[in-house]
Image: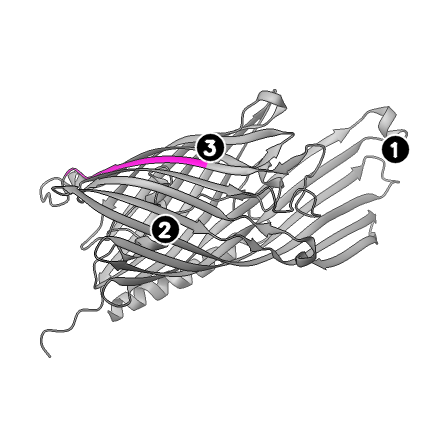
Amino acid sequence: MIKGIKRILTLVIFAIISICASAQEGTYSGYSPYSVFGIGNISKEGTAYNKSMGGVGIATRNKRFINIVNPAAVTARDSLSFMGNFGLTQSNNIYKQGDIKSAHNTFNISDFVMSFPIYKSSAFMVGITPYSDMGYDFSHVITDKNIIGNTGSITYDSYGIGSVYQLFAGAGVTFWKRLSLGAEVLFMFGNLDKVTNMNFSDASYRSLNSGNKLTVRGITGKFGLQYEQKLGGNVSMILGATYRMGSKVRGYATDYRFATQSSVVDTLGYNVDTLKKAGLQFADEIGVGISIKGGEKWSAEINYIRSDWSKSGMDSAVGFSSVGESVFSTTVSNSYRAGFEIVPNRNDVRYYFRRCAYRAGVYYDQAYYKLDGNNVNSIGMTLGITLPVYKWYNGISLGVDFGQRASKRNNMIRERYATFNVGFNIHDIWFQKPRYN
């Protein structure tokens, strides 16, 4: 047990360092031109295990992995086991609009979670994951004489960076070996920085620098349930549901504007206000799922998730609303996910790869915002594998997500991506009594 504690402490320190490093100015945790609106692009929930199955998890009960999608799933475990997970994400993106093409790569921590039993059929988990990521950088030059007059060309450069993380703690309990209930408390926190610079080619004119610095906070709760029904033999069906409550957005918004010429900087405007006055909200979310599994050999699952952001207040709030000429507006987000897992033979002592878990999945997501009245949809497929390491349920989960966000229609930016997820699954027996002194 002492060795296990030292191992987890090492991971905690590494996770904190990684989070602090990813939050440093100049480092993009995520990158997408669509993250310019609101709180950025909302991250896919779950560990590498979930993400390699299309993002399912509402009806998943697997004692070998921590499932953070549904808090009721924390009770799917061996009664004496300690479990941990540390995940990393690397994304490669290609963007195209008309004849313009660009690319960008990012690297970020994706999750750090620990879980252990409380008493008999109850268990506890605590962790941290990204909730949303913001990262963009675009510019354009105005040369139309009817607009600029005699000032020379004007270059507009806009960029944004930041993330909102969610720190959560939850517990679950199972009744009659069939019905599992869970609940968790989530604390949202993060910083978002949006900057726009206007530079004149004629040095006699002053450059303008403006932007918004947002410090975001919020507390909410999430509830989940799962019901498992045996169908015969080792086959069973699981029904699952989750509900995350909406919550007020707290924090501060700094709105500034400076004029610069040579080394002289004049403050044109500087205002700090609380986000409470803006009446902003994190939307609530409801999800349902159904899965069928054949013991520990195979499983298949489908999920549906809905979240209504139309009353979040971000359409017109300073610092959250549109940047530039394009108009963003909030809407209802919908997500459809399906995934499959199979293990040829967990107990094979001759062929290692027959003990590995293989996964695949597909998904279709509709974002919580529209661009110029057009839905921004994502579609993709996932593949994954878990490589057993040493003993118990220790392993390394590898996954890849191939997908596309939006299209080139209606002058939108098509975003294609390949995202690689790595999860380190840690398992140990901590709570057994010694048999001799």
Quickly name the residue at label 1: 151
Q: Is residue 39 above or below residue 403?
A: below
Query: Which mark is nearer the camera, 1 or 3?
Result: 3
* Disc 2: CA contacts within 10 A as few (<14), some (14-19) or many (>=20): many
Q: Nearer the viewer, residue 295 or 233?
A: 233
Residue type indicated by callout 1 = Thr
Q: Residue at x 36, y 64 (%)?
A: 10
Q: Residue at x 78, y 56 (%)?
A: 270
Residue stretch in magenta: 335-344
Q: Is residue 179 left or right of residue 255?
A: left
- Identify the residue position indicated by label 3 in the image: 417
Which label lies toward us, 1 or 2?
2
Q: Is residue 207 left or right of residue 114?
A: right
Amino acid carrying mark 2 in the image: Asn
Q: Residue at x 82, y 48 (%)?
A: 260
Q: Is residue 270 above or below residue 94?
A: below
Residue that mark 2 sits on: 70
Among the two numbered marks 1 and 3 on one chain, the one whose residue lies closer to the N terminus: 1
Mark 2 vs 3, N-terminal side: 2
Measured from the top left, where is residue 225 in percent x and y? 34, 52
Q: Which image quadrant for residue 38? A: top right
Image quadrant in which the N terminus is located: bottom left
* x and y, in percent, of residue 259 in the image: 82, 48
Do we see residue 59 in this rendering? no
